[in-house]
Amino acid sequence: MGLLTNVINGVSLGSVYAIIALGYTMVYGIAKMLNFAHGDIIMVGGYLCFCAVQYLGLPPLVGVVLACAGCTCLGIVIERLAYKPLREAPSLAVLITAIGVSYFLQNSALLIWKSDPKVFPSVVKLPTLSFFGGQLNVSPLSIVTVLTCIAVMVGLTLFTQRTKMGKAMRACSEDKGAAQLMGIDVNATISMVFAIGSGLAAIAGVLLCSAYPTLMPTTGSLPGIKAFTAAVFGGIGSIPGAMLGGILLGIIEIFAKAYIGTELADAIVFGVLIVVLLVRPAGLLGTFVPEKV
């Protein structure tokens, strides 16, 4: 049962990575930029839910909704103030700005919530499920995490395929200039992408803090990097690729911790990414697009 337990834990952890990776892959797919502040929005979402539940005494579900709303607004503000003025700037300038926004959010969290760790309250208060006479125990949080990931994946796919805004996002991803000539508001479309990605980051932050209930201003840094790795692993710019990359990355990490050692788990995760990129530079589900010169 140890093998099955590790698979369940890996899928659960990978589902969190997948939700975060969806934010990375959407922003890159449409705005063609890497929002390295995404991991810190995860942290902000965790703190907003913590304050709503712990200080205001609100139900956990309401706390999650408030965290999503707060991070959605934060994502729009960050895009308008930090990234929109650099729409035509070199990619290096955008990258440096993203790192600056990341440090700004971390230090703002230090000023507001201080550096001492907070114990995050559980948002899923259901009994543990036991199978095979108690040999296999499944946490309700794992089930909720996986179901949330599937719901987000299906919802995003339907949104991008069926709605007018989703079609506008796909058009901007193909060619912003042509999309603008066809009457699409590119700036509003990119703002919507940041809003959706930041809302997903809040959900991932709540799930992550529920699984590892120590909340600090640096909480989202390492998971954010791993989720970016998952997005590249699956094929950045691909929504199914982000989910596949996140699930596989979570399983690899859990098995590495179980059978090799906690100290080497992160090195193995990034090592697997290097091997995959050597074989498939565009990622598992990514498509190589030759650049015309």
Image: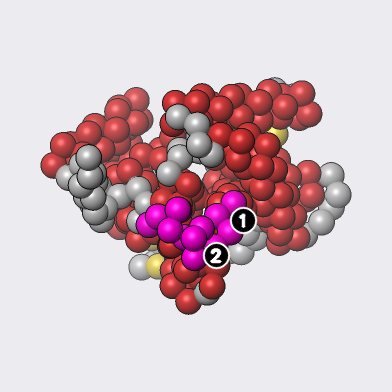
Is residue 101 in sight in this rendering? yes
Q: CA distance from mark 1 to mark 2?
A: 12 Å
Q: Residue at x 49, y 65 (%)?
A: 182
The answer to whether residue 121 is left or right of residue 134 is: right
Look at mark 2 in the image and give the residue it sits on: 183
Q: Residue at x 59, y 51 (%)?
A: 187
Q: Residue at x 66, y 42 (%)?
A: 80
Is-magenta flag for residue 6?
no
Q: Amino acid at mark 1?
A: Ala
The answer to whether residue 13 is left or right of residue 210 is: left
Is residue 242 in sight in this rendering? no
Quadrant of the snapshot with the N terminus: bottom left
Q: Residue furthest left?
A: 279
- Give the x, y percent position of residue 9: 40, 52
User: In the picture shown, does residue 99 fall above or below 171?
Assistant: above
- Give the x, y percent position of residue 100: 59, 24
Look at mark 1 in the image and give the residue it sits on: 188
Q: Which residues are magenta?
A: 174-187
Helix, strand or loop for disc 1: helix
Q: Residue furthest front?
A: 181
Quadrant of the snapshot with the C terminus: top left
The answer to whether residue 187 is left or right of residue 257 is: right
User: In the picture shown, does residue 81 fall above or below 112?
Assistant: below
Q: Nearer the viewer, residue 263 or 219?
A: 219
Is-magenta flag for residue 184?
yes
Q: Nearer the viewer, residue 78 or 44?
A: 78
Helix, strand or loop for disc 2: loop
Q: Amino acid at mark 2?
A: Gly
